[in-house]
Amino acid sequence: MRALPRRVHHPLEARARFGARFDALVGALGRADPPADQVIEALADRPRELARLVDLSFDTPRDPAIPRPLRELVDAASAPPAWVDWQQVDAAGRLFFRAGPLGGLVLALRSLVAGYLSPAGNKPLVFSGRLKEQAPRRLAETGRFVTAVCAPGGLRSGGDGVRITLKVRLMHAQVRRLLLASGRWRLDLWSLPINQHDMLATVLLFSVVFTDGLRLLGLEIDEAEGDTYLHLWRYVGHLIGVEPELLPWSEAAARRDVDLIELTQGTPDEDSRVLTESVLRLALDAPGGGLSRHLEPLRAGLVASVCRRLIGAPIADQLGLPRAPLDLALPALTRAINGLERARGRLTPLATLGRRVGEGYWRMAVDGALAGQPATFEPPQRLAHP
């Protein structure tokens, strides 16, 4: 039998529980994204032009400055698969904005933190310095990406969501190229950087891991709504280069993939803890002042408590997140949120108000984090220092 990659843990249990799906996801560790990699090779000497050329490919598709691999990539992204249901895509976007500030908490303290838990999957972030050294910028761009794909019309041909998704895809390909050329990447330990398995994992983090986190905080999301939200992210996964056969069709199937990945990825390492601390620290970096300094321990306890609830006590303990008295108050807060959710479901004006509040929250959160600078999604030219 062919040897398994060293990053795969508990293979016997995983194969017994998940059967052929285990073999499919393990095989995906050895595959990257050839169409995006070809674009990066064509523009290897001018990576700063990638984001501009993506926009040019939509706005002036026959411009001679656009290399053929990029034109082909954009042409493919401009022809949605027959399975895309635009009513579901629009409904999924409304769900995202309805979540408002709770969505911000879940995105940062569950989806992103869960992505740092894999000792192999977190290494591209570590080597690129995209989080530890550039945390505010990277998280602001993540917020811009998610809001763009969920905005009305964002995933229609030429929409901001499509453009940004392709820029992120090419950013991944550039990081992959830099890592493989660096002499520092351990294929034997980590498999290919930003491989198909890890790309699928990212789609799951932004879809079913996100909606399950909203449920933990008290939002009412039934199975049909969860499947609808996954549908949007299934399309984003298609655009970002995940192979079609890897993308699940339902929340139930997606949740099984999450369980499989969690079982086989191993326990969090020191990089997991450092990356998590970077996210938690951002939640505490409000404008200063004497009052802010006095409140910092309270705010730190609140952030840690919410994160513990969202990722679970066992993982939180592995990450070294402290327990706090606020842990005991969160169930009551969740019940209060759930009560508001039930009222929202009965009163249309309250539902409309909630969605508008959510849209305003995300505009303020993303624009504030970007501090007046555009989110360019420019690929890095070099890796961070060791």
Image (tube, helix red, strand yellow):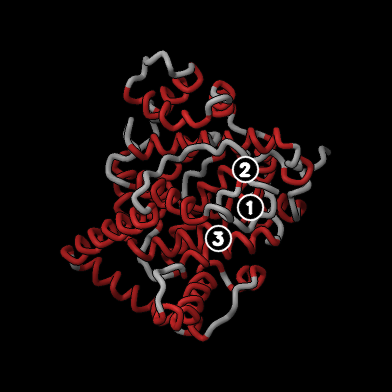
Q: Are the two marked residues, 3 and 1, in contact with CB atoms closer than 8 angstroms?
A: no
Counting from the top left corner in percent of width and height, residue 365 is at 35, 58
Q: Earlier in the sequence, mark 3 or mark 1?
A: 3
Q: Residue at x 40, y 76 (%)?
A: 289
Counting from the top left corner in percent of width and height, residue 108 is at 47, 60
Q: Is residue 359 left or right of residue 175?
A: left
Mark 3 or 1: in front is 3
Q: Which residue is mark 1?
A: 261
* Occupied quadrant, residue 33: top right
The numbered mark at residue 113 is 3
Q: Which residue is mark 2?
A: 197
Q: Residue at x 58, y 56 (%)?
A: 132
- Residue kind at label 1, given as amino acid type: Ile
Counting from the top left corner in percent of width and height, residue 240 is at 49, 37
Q: Residue at x 25, y 66 (%)?
A: 345
Q: Residues within 10 Å of mark 1 (few under 14, many from 20)?
A: many
For the residues labelled 3 and 2, the Cα–Cα distance comes to 18 Å
Q: Residues within 10 Å of mark 3 (few under 14, many from 20)?
A: many
Q: Earlier in the sequence, mark 3 or mark 2?
A: 3
* Disc 1 secondary structure class: helix
Q: Residues within 10 Å of mark 2 (few under 14, many from 20)?
A: many
User: In this view of the protein, which residue sits in the foreground, 347 or 44?
Assistant: 44
Quadrant of image for the N terminus: top right
Outermost residue to the left: 349
